[in-house]
Image (cartoon, coloured by chain):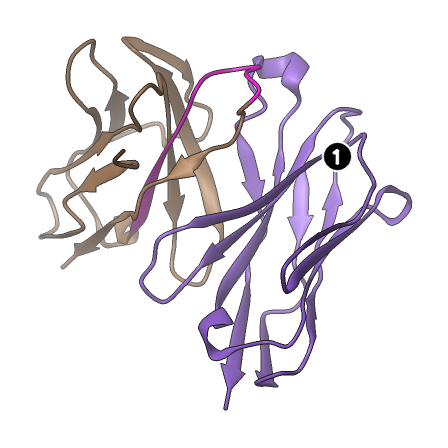
Amino acid sequence: NAGVMQNPRHLVRRRGQEARLRCSPMKGHSHVYWYRQLPEEGLKFMVYLQKENIIDESGMPKERFSAEFPKEGPSILRIQQVVRGDSAAYFCASSLGPNSGANVLTFGAGSRLTVL
Amino acid sequence: AQKVTQAQTEISVVEKEDVTLDCVYETRDTTYYLFWYKQPPSGELVFLIRRNSFDEQNEISGRYSWNFQKSTSSFNFTITASQVVDSAVYFCALSDSLELTGGGNKLTFGTGTQLKVEL
């Protein structure tokens, strides 16, 4: 029973390029969350999605960042025109859903983005 | 607004020593969850414990124990007889209000405590 799968684990981009990070939730989980961890800091919430819906994007930067969780396939976090400040570890987590007994986020191993 | 403070940035201990990691939180919600996660050098986040705001009973799991005190808004984590494999960054986290989002899964993390256990 695979956990939350993220890829790529490491991604290097030059300034101005696009970064796409993928996340496949745990089997049976329909809720996905993205968090960002800047160097020497804790994780910061970015966005919460269900299939085909963005539930809460209050932590997403207003520009260049977008997320989706299509009906089929993994969730995608997309960063356009990356800048050096985007260098961070991006963690995906999934859960069974709101108000469920489980109510525990299972995290992936993270995708580490380096912008040159 | 929710806030989690882990005042200890880094702790170094010698193997077999006991160590306590502090966590203080702020919230206006009456219903919330508290969590501890471990991040070993490999980078993944490992869930350790979840505690809801109505359950102040302390918990012990092997060498790990947690002390939840609502009166001081603290949720401290103690490792007994520490081992080198305990070396990691430990994060305390607080969920948001279940009433607001219907989920309680949006976590506010502290900045983490780096624990180094040496031989």
Amino acid residing under circle 1? Thr
Q: B6 and B89: which one is in front?
A: B89
Say left or right for A22 vs B52: left
Which quadrant holds residue B115? bottom right
Residue B39 is situated, as x and y percent measured from the top left of the image, at: 43, 58
Pick the front one: B39 or B107: B39
Q: Is residue B1 visible?
A: no
Residue that carries the numbered disc 1 in the rendered image: B27
In the figure, B18 relative to B22: above or below?
Answer: below
Q: Is residue A13 left or right of residue A66?
A: left
* Start-end of magenta stretch: A89-101
A44 vs B35, left or right, is left
Front one among B53 and A79? B53
Give the quadrant of the N terminus of chain B.
Answer: top right
Magenta segment includes B42: no
Magenta span has A94?
yes
Task: Answer left or right for B14 relative to A58.
Answer: right
Residue A95 percent coordinates (x, y) = 43, 25
Depth check: give the residue in front, B79 or A39: B79
Above or below, A111 against A40 in this view is: above
Across and down, in percent, residue A10 comes to: 16, 53
Quadrant for residue B107, please give it. Answer: top right
Extreme front residue here?
B62
The quarter of the displayed image where residue A22 is located? top left
Q: Colour of chain B?
A: purple
Q: Colour of chain A?
A: brown
Q: Give the crowd class for mark 1: few <14, some 14-19, many >=20 residues within 10 Å.
A: some
| Numbered disc total | 1
The residue positioned 59% from the left and 23% from the top of the image is B104
Query: In the rendered image, is residue B81 in sight?
Result: yes
The residue that appears at 50% across and 87% down in the rendered structure is B118
